[in-house]
Image (cartoon, rainbow, N blue to C red):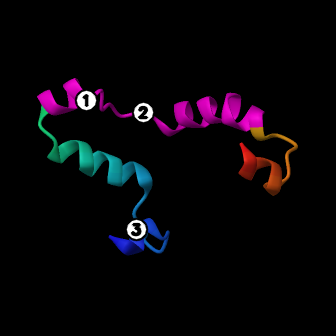
Amino acid sequence: MLKILSGQSNMKPEDLGTYYESILEKEVRKEGGIYYTPQYVVDYIVANTVGTLLKGKTHEEVAKI
């Protein structure tokens, strides 16, 4: 598991998410609002929210947010 978290694994984040969702019972996923989100949707949301907020800022400025 540490290899996955440190980026030293060949496992893609999507695969880990799929595995995590597969071990949860359907009702738990539904009640917890746990749903698969395709990577292109995540990229769009990040680019148009956090990405916009951080654009042009230094590391020091980002650390203060």
Q: Quadrant of residue 21?
A: top left
Bounds of the magenta segment: 27-53
In the image, residue 41 lies in the stretch drawn in magenta? yes
Q: Quadrant of residue 10?
A: bottom left
Q: Which mark is residue 32?
A: 1
Question: Quick check: 54 left or right of 38?
Answer: right
The residue tagged 2 is: 37
> What's the amino acid at mark 2?
Thr
Measuring from the top left, give residue 19's x and y in whole percent: 25, 51
- How far is disc 3 from disc 2 in space, using C-alphas? 20 Å
Measuring from the top left, give residue 40's x and y in whole percent: 55, 35
Q: Residues within 10 Å of mark 2 (few under 14, many from 20)?
A: few
Point out the image quarter for the C terminus: top right
Q: Nearer the viewer, mark 3 or mark 1?
A: 1
Provide the secondary structure element on which disc 3 rests.
Answer: helix
Question: Quick check: 23 left or right of 11?
Answer: left
